Amino acid sequence: MHPDVQSLKICILGAGMGGLTCALALARAGFNNITIFEVASNLGFVGAGIQMAPNMARILDRLGVWDDIFKDAVVLNETSIRQGSTDTELGHVDLRYIKEAYQYPHTVGHRATLASELYNGCKRESDKIKFEFGTTCENVRFGAKPSFTAVPRHQGVPYEVECDVLLGADGVKSNTRVAMLRELNVEAEVKDTAQAAYRIMLTREQLSSDPELLALIDADKVIRWIGEKRHIIAYPVSSKQIYNLSTTQPDVNFAAAPSATYTTKGSKKAMLDVFGDFCPMIHRMLDLVPEGEVCEWKLRVHAPLPTWVHGSVALVGDACHPTLPHMAQGAAQAIEDAGVIAVVLAALPSGAGPSEINQALKIYEQVRKERAETLVELAAASGRALHLGEGKAKEERDKQFAALKEGKGPVPDKWADADIQKMVYGVDCMEEAEKIVRGYSFSRDS
Ligand SMILES: Cc1cc2nc3c(=O)[nH]c(=O)nc-3n(C[C@H](O)[C@H](O)[C@H](O)COP(=O)(O)OP(=O)(O)OC[C@H]3O[C@@H](n4cnc5c(N)ncnc54)[C@H](O)[C@@H]3O)c2cc1C
């Protein structure tokens, strides 16, 4: 890379999975003037598990952080989809083929490990990456050089920041997205998914007196218990010291609340009632959540955006493709965004200005947008299939589960379907971007 390209000033808004990976990927590609601005005073990640699919692992490995993340990850050998009310198995998929087919196994881990190893990776590049925690970014502007107002949280004086490239990795409530759409005079309809999630982590110690629950944490298995409009997905994380549960249920609490917040302390009784007709084993697990520690998340998406890029500004991750969690691909897609951004910007020619930067970012959008939006739609479709109530559609779905037992047909829980896995895990977006930029000639004044 040319030295003048290496020293382009790149500002990243948001230190979530997308922002951290952008910084790391750009630094590893050779960029040396990267700053991440984050509203929180530290990483402060949600205590929850995360599925780490091969398409995520491949990029993290390339960035030199996968080995440390893998140390306390759990490799999943199988998935079981069960009737929540009876614990009867509806479908079962062997996942052991994944490592051979896609070079990485399907793993699950703790979000804190994933985030802190990305952060450690960034710290190893501290001559290239600076962090500004406790700083809210507002008023994004789209000139030849993008700019924004940085507002330090603790009585600091707001200051203006101008840069060559601005990456809006500021999550589902992205200020950057709002500013971009306003600038383009378009609206992206916010979609109320009418779904919310509880996230629960139970320690091995909490399960220790219950052999049935201990068997769950000891298995190399992800289980999804389904019922009408609800499900629970669960797997062990942190070297099987924690059993992680993530639920989906109708969004009753947020729907009524005018608040802009997406998380709330939930009532334990309400949680137990939502899964009231699920089997006794699930009740015993939910009952282990201490009163006062029930936390509920609103699940929100928005309509596909007309574009992710304007001038030298690009959106990344949930800022441009928030998704329901049913494909377990939201963070993986943010990480793919980051990998591709590094590839396209690293291809810039010497003397690159706003026009070339925009062309590079448009290649990023070309490689990523359709794929990410397909996965957003697949996640929504999978949720619809899993949450069916009595009726013809459910009968059809259950026929598919029955055929699956004979080893035939698609898996209604779409993330576990081999054809879909091929499309998701078998594509290397960074390699695709490399191919495009290799044959691309940047024009100076398009
Ligand atoms: C219940 C649930 C389960 C999930 N399970 C999985 C899974 O198994 N696998 C998977 O791959 N994905 C999963 N996801 C999706 C995944 O968590 C998200 O897609 C991913 O975390 C998005 O990362 P991001 O960096 O784009 O956004 P975020 O993680 O939201 O990060 C945005 C960051 O920007 C900061 N910020 C916001 N506004 C500003 C501002 N104005 N100025 C400065 N900073 C700002 C925020 O504080 C935050 O740190 C799940 C999601 C949910 C809700």
Image (tube, rainbow, N blue to C red):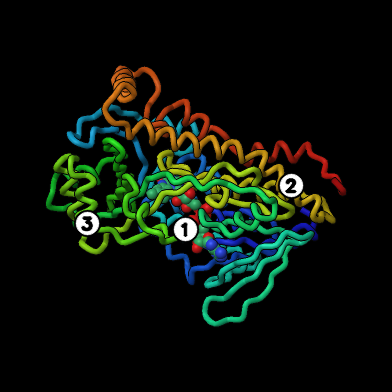
Up the image or down, 312 lies above or below 221; here it is below
Horizontal side, residue 132 vs residue 270: left or right: right
Quarter of the image holding residue 78?
A: top left
Going from N to C along the chain, the mark reached first, 2 or 1, is 1
Q: Which residue is mark 2?
A: 360
Q: Which residue is mark 3?
A: 268
Q: Which residue is mark 1?
A: 115
Q: Regarding mark 2 in the picture, which secondary structure is present there?
A: helix
Q: Residue 2: tell me if it is visible.
A: yes
| Amino acid type at image mark 3 | Lys
- Residue farthest to the right, as pictured: 445
Tell me the crowding category of disc 3: few under 14, some 14 to 19, or many 20 or more residues within 10 angstroms, Cα based.
Answer: some
How far, Cα to Cα, is label 2 from label 1?
27 Å
Q: Quadrant of the C terminus?
A: top right
Q: Of tags 2 and 1, which is closer to the observer? A: 2
The x, y position of residue 189, in whole percent, is 54, 46
Q: Residue at 30%, 48% (x, y): give it.
A: 245
Q: Regarding mark 1 in the picture, which secondary structure is present there?
A: helix
| Amino acid type at image mark 1 | Ala
